[in-house]
Amino acid sequence: MNCENGSIALKLYVASGTPNSVLALRNLQTIIDDFLQGHHTLEIIDVFKEPSRAIADGILVTPSLVKLSPPPRISIIGNLSDREAVLVALDLGEPR
Amino acid sequence: MLGEAGIFVAFEENSRQITENAATFGWDLPALEKEKLFFLDARMSPDMVMSGGFDLNGMLASIVSKAEEIGATRVVFDSIDVLLTLLDDPVAKRRELYRIRDWLSETGLTGIMTLRASNDTKYIEDYGFMQFMADCVIVLNHSLVDHVSLRGARIAKYRGSQFSENEFPMIIGPRGIEIAKMDLSEPDYEVFTERVSTGVERLDAMLNGGYLRGSSILITGAPGTAKSSLAGTFIEAACKRAEKALYVSFDESANEIIRNMTSINIHLLPYVRSGILRMYSARTESRSAEEHLINIRKVIEEQQPGCMVVDPLSAMVKAGGHITALGVAQRLIHLAKSKGMTLLCTSLLEFRGEPFSEATEIRISTVADTWINLSYIAKGGERNRALSIVKSRGTRHSNQVREMILSDEGITLADVYTAGGEVLMGTLRWEREKAERRAEEQRQMDAERKRIELELADSEINARIQSLKRELEANRTELKRLSVDEAAYERDETQRLADLQGLRRAD
């Protein structure tokens, strides 16, 4: 599994306070807890506070999760409630 | 365009594609993009993963910041449905659209959302409410009618504003988007009482001097009834007056028309060369009726003709839908009238019983001022061309059906021969003509004979007069001689008596 070879870099774009974004943060946290446990970096960008960054990064909808490394770059949109889809996209296996 | 900046959010194409496509319409987006326009490429990457619900809060926040940065007042969400299809739940779709609407009214931006329309139930479930939500709904329609593409735009609603509810044809051309708007104002044209020649002397007479200037003339007829020829004489007459003219033909090249016209003594070529006449020919199928109209209008502007022919107008009917073509025909007529042009249109009249015979034609003909119908009359084993004036507004016109004859010398209308209440044509007319000619000859011969007889009698009388005169003269001479003789005799007698007395020495 990729996560064993190195850390995984994630960016989460949220619109703070909106239900989907709150849900996304919560869902991502459980995935991190179950799979990554420190083998990752996570940056959370609040588009309400930094609107120009989202445009610059090509992010439109919130919430959006972007995996920057290892390649390929993957973006996942939505509140991450479809846990299986997120795990497949991030290539994460069985929980530790 | 109005000096206001805008943001274009493209969900389907990238900004480069849009810019390139726009360039083909002559829109210089790159120049605008430098200051007034911001493209937001909002395409979803194909390998993007969906996981659960999302919303547009982030995007809207980003756009607001960009709008503030460039001072944009307008925003376009192009193909927003592409994004929203990612939301499976119709309620969520609706929520996001309402979010956009509320966001627009909060921020004071004017927004356009484009989305695909269809009639399937899925669409109606998802986006049917859009019609109620938006302040203004414009429905664009693209259909194929007889393989010709037709675009239409219809304003379905516009809160707080008057609007025309019909669907109007729309064209995308080099000059951008043109909507063929109907003129809603009352027609008000300059009217003329001047007559322009039809180019056929006897037809002029039938029409009380010719077509009215600035009127529209419709010539209908079955194939081969010489509709174009009448159009040709009209155009030639205009050229002879040195009046600028335009001949629009469909599916027949200018050279063909000129050549064919030459066979009936209509010579257009010199006028084409001198620029008095402009021939414009178009392919029917290549464009929709609207596009034809736009092109014709361009040619009209260049040529500024006083007389114009569209031959045949029914070709436009072929070009995508009767209704559209009729709308085009009407607008063409209005255009001609507003310019004071005399417009002659020919139209193929299919035989009765064919799909579009009467209704279509009559609807064009209600707009036309003069309607001349050409037909074949088959009788006595032959077909002859017949011309009748169905109507002619503002003209006291002949109601007679006339036979039209095409020859090397041109077009003319034959003399009228009626028999049993019918106008005779072709051989029947010819026979009648011959019979009349024979009768005439007979009459002439009789008269000649009578004349000769009378002359003979005359000369006889003269001769008699002469001989009597001579007799009279002889008498007179005789008489004279007699009196002379008498005088001489008397003189002689006197002399003789004197002599005798002298001889006798009598006293």
Image (spheres, coloured by chain):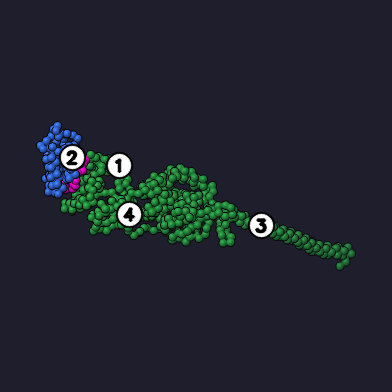
Chain colours: A blue, B green
| Secondary structure under the numbered disc 1 in the rendered image | helix
Task: Please give the label number shown on residue B167.
Answer: 4
Mark 4: amino acid = Glu
Q: Which chain carries label 4?
A: B
Cα gap from disc 3 to disc 2, whole angstroms: 116 Å
Q: In which quarter of the image is residue B162?
A: bottom left
Label 1 and label 2: CA atoms lie apart by 45 Å
Q: Nearer the viewer, mark 3 or mark 4?
A: 4
List the residue tagged with mark 2: A87
Neighbours of disc 1 within 10 Å: few (<14), some (14-19), many (20+): few
Q: Mark 3 points at which residue?
A: B442
User: Label 3 to label 4, Cα distance in Å?
Assistant: 71 Å
Q: Which residues make up the magenta segment?
A: B48-60
Task: From the top left corner, tell me how far across and down residue B173 is, in percent.
Answer: 32, 45
Whichever of labels 1 and 4 marks the residue nearer the N terminus, that label is: 1
Q: Which of B179 and A5 is in front in this view?
A: A5
Task: Confirm whether the magenta stretch covers residue B434.
Answer: no
Quadrant that contains the C terminus of chain A:
top left
Q: Does the segment drawn in magenta span residue B53?
A: yes
